[in-house]
Image (cartoon, rainbow, N blue to C red):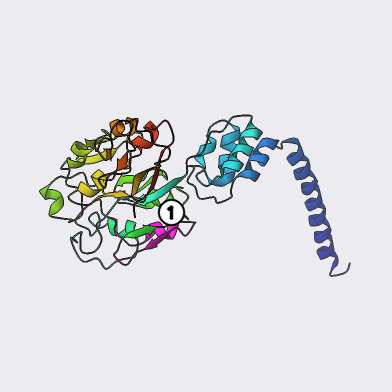
Amino acid sequence: MSMFEPIIWSIVVLGGLGAVFGIMLGAASRKFAVKKDERVVAVRENLPGANCGGCGYPGCDGLADALVAGKAEVSACAVLSQDDAKKIGGILGISVGELVPKVARIMCLGSEGHCKNKFEYDGALDCRAAYAIAGGFKACKFACLGLGTCAKVCKFDAITMGPDGIAFIDEDKCTGCGRCVEQCPQSSIAVLPKNVDVYVGCTNTGRGREVMENCSAGCIGCGKCASLCPFGAITMENNLPVIDPEKCRSCWLCVEQCPRKCILTTKSDLKAKINRQKCVGCTLCAKACPFGAIEGELKMTHTVTDICRGCGLCEEACKLGAITMVPKS
């Protein structure tokens, strides 16, 4: 017997066993295979592939399974385009309405020079690590800690850290996936519909002196904005203004009159412009204006004064299309 014969037989036996087990596994995989719903594959092909987790499922594959199973809405994907949403709706045999784009916004104005520090922090550059030490180093427990955790988790490079110690969000890049909101220990980021152009840039539920001792830019819950709003769009809840976007006309009155300047707007300042050739002096616009910004006698061409706040009610009231909203010069 050759000295190599045992080795050869070992190789033959192992090779044979490997072949047998391979055949058995192949047969088992075919017999017990779970058939993949073709709709899942088709839906997945139309999802953006960002795998940002904003939908609440483990990536786009998880969302595709949930959509086909009827456990999720198409609107769950913040990155999805309207065209792809309609394609998915066609695959699933459902109607898909207009998707409302969303963006994340920083709900804090407590930058350096505004919000005080409780102590000097010299730890890891991570907001969650800082928060683990006595709730963070900021005197306001709702303040942005400015250590960039939100920027690190953003898959769209939409967040950068400003020189004032507050995160900055590029709304042109932001998809509103909400990943930054999940990671922020201070709850100082919120995802809002992109068309909401007036919002409160503070989440501190304290009031008056309590807020003023810690931050010179925080909302003090005075309620002035709510009492001034001519449209009843603002109510006070937990010492903070809550703005109803369905009622808000973006007149900027609350923005300008807030003593702490913590109500913000993203839109340009507008005013009404009357087309003199179309105006017949019906006075409908003047009656609709809550600010008394339109002057003119009945059957005479009307004019808009400087106190116009661009709310657009006059434009809606005009039956002849004689009024448009234009940026203030």
Rendering quarter of residue 43:
top right
Locate residue 166: give its quadrant: bottom left
Q: How far across and how far down the image is residue 278, in percent?
A: 43, 37
Residue of label 1: 171
Q: Is residue 280 visible?
A: yes
| Kind of residue at badge 1 | Glu
Name, please, the residue furthest toward the front. 300
Q: Main secondary structure of the magenta part?
A: loop
**Circle 1 sits in a helix, a strand or a loop, which is it?**
loop
**Height in image: 240 above or below 129?**
above
Q: Is residue 179 left or right of residue 39?
A: left
Name the residue rendered at 41%, 43% in the picture.
195
Choose between 26 and 163: the one closer to the eye. 163
Please state the horizontal and vertical placement of residue 128, each as a whole percent of the image. Answer: 33, 56
Is 224 colored magenta in this rendering?
no
- Split into 4 quadrants, where in the image is the C terminus? bottom left
Residue found at the very far left of the displayed protein = 209
Instruction: Tell me the quarter of the image containing the N terminus.
Output: bottom right
* Magenta stretch holds residue 144: yes
Nearest the viewer among 202 and 325 is 325
Q: Which residues are magenta?
A: 140-164
On screen, 67 above or below 18?
above
Is 284 placed above or below 307 here? Answer: above
